[in-house]
Image: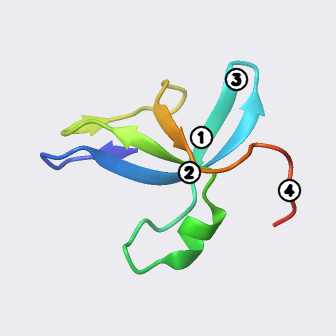
Amino acid sequence: MENPGSRRGYLRVTLTPDAKGFGARLTGDQGSAILRSMVLADGLAVVAPDTTIAEGQAVDVIVLRSLEPRSR
């Protein structure tokens, strides 16, 4: 995940349980007109300005819904 800009970024992610708690994965294209990525999102990963988050690195997430299993 990357935020090359000068403002805090919010990336739509799905969350899945793992050994460390939850893993976050991008929902796909993050464009403002892509409604599907918002519908699929469990949360918003908060990315500081001018930051790259490596795979496996911890990231803060604003949870948008219950994390109980659901069908998609």
Mark 2–mark 4 distance (CA, rounded to whole Å): 15 Å
Mark 2 touches mark 1? (CB < 8 Å): yes
> What kind of element bears circle 4?
loop
Residue at 73 percent of width and 40 percent of height: 16
Disc 2 designates what residue?
Answer: 13
Quadrant of residue 21 within the rendered picture: top right
Residue type at mark 1? Ala
Mark 3–mark 4 distance (CA, rounded to whole Å): 18 Å
Residue at 43 percent of width and 32 percent of height: 54
Residue type at mark 3? Gly
Residue at 17 percent of width and 46 percent of height: 7
Q: Nearer the viewer, mark 2 or mark 4?
A: 4
Disc 1 designates what residue?
Answer: 24
Residue type at mark 2? Val
The disc at residue 70 is: 4
Identity of the residue furthest to the left in this view? 6
> What kind of element bears circle 3?
strand
Vertical comparison of 22 with 67: above or below: above
Report the coloring of the rendering. rainbow
Quadrant location of the C terminus? bottom right
Mark 3–mark 1 distance (CA, rounded to whole Å): 10 Å
Residue type at mark 4? Arg
Foreground of the two, 42 or 19: 42
